[in-house]
Image (cartoon, helix red, strand yellow):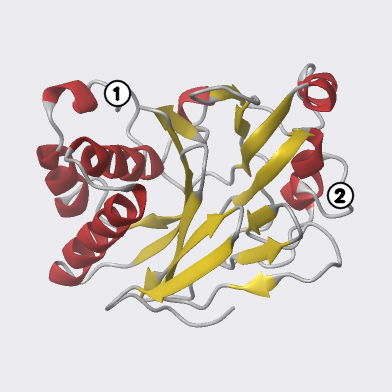
Amino acid sequence: MCRIAGYLGPSRPLADLFFSPPHGLSDQAYRPRELVHGHVNVDGTGVAWWPEGADGPLRYVTAATPWADPNLRDLAARLTGTMILGAVRSATPGVGFGTDHVAPFVLDGVAVAHNGWFQGLAGPVGRALVADLDDDLLGHLRVWNDSRLLFLTVVAGLRDGLELPKAMARAVTRIADLCVRHDLVCSLTVVAGDGRRFVATRAALGERANSLYTRVAANATWVASEPLDDRDWSPVPPGSLVVVTADGTDVEPLDGLEGTAS
């Protein structure tokens, strides 16, 4: 069910999320420790990053695993960013395969990755979320994918003038409310970045919330599905939204969204 990792701080190579740490995303793709569903994350790899001084992210995605892509290891050693968001994918049954399905998804200067799923994609939840989108955003859907639809719901909030934390909270609670209305299950651990902060949720209804951790150092911060190494990582409580900046983290509850601890 996917693994995500993000970094914010002085410019570092993309490899620092994928290949350099002892439990980086390349390792988490084939031997994750805390998956709620599934066993491996081998259905695609993606990364969005902000080069120093850039006003928006670049993106690289592949349908391959991190170690099987012919370009990623060399690129990741040389390309750098002051914000990096990476993901390895475990496809939800019934959702397609290919690069259009691989997070992070990028639009309007924000990158979003979702570790989870929601029922009712081909039913009342998906139908309602699509109806919420204006024509331009609907054109960015491209493939029928719950994570991409969640991403566009976040972007819709930004276009309505909300700051990223409010847009994220609105999107997650909108999906949760629809699932409650139709007695459906959702898993909504999501990480979004806009170049200066990450906003993440750890939440679920009807099942355990997927794991999420943060780490704060002297001049950098991280957010990840699983610790990348054996340093001091702090678990985000279920039912929470966390804002991660260069100065640290700020956690607040998401009303009505809990799940249980992993």
Instruction: Say above or below: 49 vs 236.
Output: above
Please tell me whether residue 11 is drawn above or below residue 229 in the rendered image: above
Q: Which residue is mark 1?
A: 140
Mark 2 — residue? 21
Q: Residue drawn at (78%, 17%), measured in percent from left and top?
A: 71
Element class at badge 2: loop
Q: Quadrant of the C terminus?
A: bottom right
In this rendering, would 64 be left or right of 202?
right
Residue plotted at (86% across, 67% down): 230
Amino acid under disc 1: His
Relative image position of residue 176 (x, y in whole percent): 25, 65
Residue 170: percent from left, percent from top: 24, 57
Mark 1 residue element: loop
Q: Check disc 2 and give the amino acid type.
A: Pro
- The image position of residue 213, as x and y in percent, is 63, 66
120 on left or right of 96: left
Residue that extends furthest to the bottom in the rendered view of this protein: 260
Measured as percent of width and height from the top left, residue 37 is found at: 56, 63
The quarter of the displayed image where residue 239 is located: bottom left
Check disc 1: other Cα within 10 Å, few if <14, some if 14-19, many if 20+: few
Q: Residue at x 23, y 20 (%)?
A: 139
